[in-house]
Amino acid sequence: MVGVPNVTRTDAVAALRNPLAFISERWTPAPRTVQRAALSALVMSVVIVVTGGAVRLTGSGLGCPTWPKCTADSLTATSAMGFHGAIEFGNRMLTYVLCAAVGWAIIAARSEKPRRAGLTRLGWAQFWLVMSNAVLGGIVVLVGLNPYTVAAHFLLASALIAVAALMWQRTREGDGEPRPLVGKPVQQLVWFLVLASSLLIAVGTVVTGAGPHAGDSSEVERMPLDWETVAKLHAVLAWIVVTLTFALWFILKAVDAPRGPLNRTRELFLVLLAQGVIGYVQYFTNLPEVLVGLHMLGSALVWIWVLLVLLALRERPAATAGLPGPVAEAAVRSNA
């Protein structure tokens, strides 16, 4: 018979006072576990964007007409609210799944040995972004899907994706001083690529705010802009991003850059091509909902790969200073 470990009153008090420290003292996750936890948070940050798009594209944005309850009298959607209520409430419930994924990432990062405070901070940054966007999502409902708040909601979700991607990358690196793998001109080109991609996403929210998919079947305010003009500006920015990516790939090949930056740039170029095809097809087919949803997924993937290109420009070995000999050797081997 296996004995059950005794939990003392002191342990119970410690767990209540600081549950993260309590877990960290008793559990050391493998590096792969920490990486998977960070990846799960990144995946869920993309899923919540796509499902949020599904809410808008099905006209379910006001399926739950109030917040934080679904209706004035019910916390959940009721059968009388039909399809739209179920879609909107389901998306709200996915926020809890996202919180669970971010929580797992925080716990895994906090429990890793030796402790990496930077990873834990990135996990908490995701948590506060999720909480902020949940409140902003409630405001979006309360103001009747005002397009400016909808745009801010998407941009905050893009910030969450950025932090989640950074945390996932950092779980696969050490904490040593970053060493650049390319020269300063290439780094500057990539920063121009990041800036152009940020503008592309921002203008994309304006296209959405001025476009026909308002998010609800009722009359919803749109941005007072000519939709086709803004869409053409969005396309120009997309071509700038594609051109910068191709130029970067050409330069990296010319200078015989390491495989990491070259591979990430090639992958980004392929993602951009797929996103461009979807964008043009949806434009010339009057914005079918399925293609618009795929375009939103593509937007998240483009943003992730742009950031991965930026992060691939340097390497960070394990920080071995001050560690005992065997620990230092193990840290070097794990990052080899």
Image (cartoon, rainbow, N blue to C red):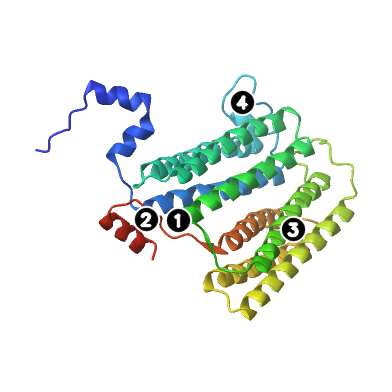
Name the residue that disc number 4 marks: 68
Q: How far is the residue under mark 1 from the one under mark 3?
A: 30 Å
Residue 262, image x, y percentages: 58, 72
Which picture quadrant has residue 4?
A: top left
The front one of 186 and 8 is 186
Looking at the rendered structure, the kind of residue marked 2 is Thr
Label 2's element?
A: loop
Residue 52, image x, y percentages: 64, 43
Residue 196's mark? 3
Q: Do the residues labelled 2 and 1 touch (CB within 8 Å)?
A: yes
Label 3's element?
A: helix
Q: Are marks 1 and 4 in contact (CB under 8 Å)?
A: no
Is 26 positioned to the left or the right of 297 in the image?
A: left
Residue 195, image x, y percentages: 72, 56
Q: Which residue is drawn at 51% across and 58% down?
A: 178
Dot 3 alpha-carbon crowd within 10 angstroms: few under 14, some 14 to 19, many 20 or more: some
Looking at the rendered structure, the kind of residue marked 4 is Pro
Q: How far is the residue under mark 3 from the one under mark 4?
A: 36 Å
Q: How far is the residue under mark 1 from the one under mark 4?
A: 44 Å
Name the residue that disc number 2 marks: 320
Q: Residue at x 67, y 26 (%)?
A: 66
Of badges 2 and 4, the one in the foreground is 2
Residue 176's mark? 1
